[in-house]
Image: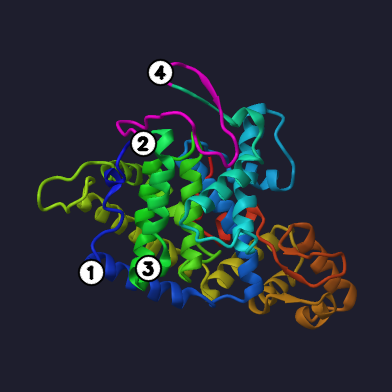
Amino acid sequence: MESIGLMEPLLPPEGTSELNDLVIDLVSKASSFAGTLNPVVSKSVGDLVRSMNCYYSNLIEGHDTHPRDIDRAIAENYSSEPEKRALQKEAVAHISVQRMIDEERAPDLCPISSEYGQWIHKEFCKRLPEELLWVENPDTKEKIKVIPGRHRDGAVQIGRHIPPLPENLNIFLRRFNEAYDSRSLSKLQRIIAIAASHHRYVWIHPFYDGNGRVVRLMSYAALKNANVGSELWSVARGLARQKEKYKSLLQAADGHRRGDLDGRGTLSQKALIDFCAFFMKVCIDQVEYMSTILDFTTLSERMRIHIEEMIAMKQLPKGSYSLLREALLVGEFERGKVVDITGFKDRAAREVMYALLKKGLLVSDTPRGSVRLGFPIDVVERWFPLLYPATK
């Protein structure tokens, strides 16, 4: 029987000043960011961020599905190439699970728990094509079927790290649940626990495959649950943009204690603190970035410049920007208001609206319903600079 002491410490010491300062900074900036956009606009941006989160989380796993291919997959326009189609379906699966989290359709469980991780894994994997549900044992070359939501029943090795044996998973996961139960943690420790648990869950490695995607969605849900995260930003983007450092610090936190000044557990306390600090800095960076690009004044100006260029090239009619600015400002408006907003006569005003609907710059749930902003992939690079890497 492996001892659960092999996973200790599960949290940095309470009162670690570097981490406390980072948490306070994150909470302050996240609070300032919250509520800066109209709730309807936030919902539309949330759709964009889910797609972005999926892109970057898959990129960390080495699956580079282009944002345009993700956009097509959301519209059920799949590639005829089997490999690309499979990755598109993987992207849709990720987006579907995050949407359930955003819309509060996830189970009423602590996000940092083995049960929540099983729910994510089940919902994600059951949407995958058959060919993505198999892994290969690198030593025996045996093909192993990944069962949605089911913990592994065999031993694995990840680099130099050997996770707990399958017969001991339950005791490690029980300790995981106990250590990160928010009811026993201070406000500061609750947020630090999100970072610490991110590593320890991967260290346990409860599934044959999908552990990285599961833990990033767990962290996303936990940040939201702590009233720090929101559908307007994603930690996955920041982790992917520093992928090598992310993986290096995860690996370092697998290491054993380095002498008497490195805590009292089996694993390195300093390496855990270093990973937690990195995770918090990534969160802060992403809040700052999204706060900047979603600032009303700068976003509306980027939109204006882009729309004027499209008007000059006769890709949109005059008056287009006035409707888009109204949607950005108030969230949504009734179709009957287009005359007042544009100052055009009825037919001309409706032609402007229809042109914007056709290009996806305005969207509506019903043919006659209110309209709101849409963010088609064609405008993302102009309206949200550097949201994705440079186009291939």
Question: Gap between marks 4 and 2, in whole Å?
Answer: 16 Å
Residue drawn 61% across the image and 67% down it: 303
Q: Which region shows up in magenta?
A: 138-162
- Mark 3 and mark 1 in contact? Answer it, CB < 8 Å: no
Q: Check disc 1 and report the residue beneath it.
A: 15
Instruction: State which tag comes first along the sequence, 3 or 2.
Output: 2
Q: Nearer the viewer, mark 4 or mark 2?
A: 2
- As rendered, which of 373 and 3 lies closer to the eye? 3
- Mark 1 and mark 2 in contact? Answer it, CB < 8 Å: no
Instruction: State which tag comes first along the sequence, 3 or 4.
Output: 4
Type of residue at label 2?
Pro
For the N terminus, give its image quadrant: top left
Instruction: State which tag comes first along the sequence, 4 or 1.
Output: 1
Q: Is residue 271 left or right of residue 41?
A: left
Q: Nearer the viewer, mark 3 or mark 1?
A: 3
Question: Gap between marks 4 and 1, in whole Å?
Answer: 44 Å
Instruction: State which tag comes first along the sequence, 1 or 2.
Output: 1
Instruction: State which tag comes first along the sequence, 4 or 2.
Output: 4
* View extreme (left): residue: 260
Instruction: State which tag comes first along the sequence, 3 or 1.
Output: 1
Q: Secondary structure at mark 4?
A: loop
Q: Check disc 4 and report the residue beneath it.
A: 139
Question: Gap between marks 1 and 2, in whole Å?
Answer: 29 Å
Q: Check disc 3 and report the residue beneath it.
A: 184
Question: Gap between marks 3 and 1, in whole Å?
Answer: 15 Å
Residue 24 location (% of width, % of height): 33, 73
Q: Check disc 2 and report the residue beneath it.
A: 163
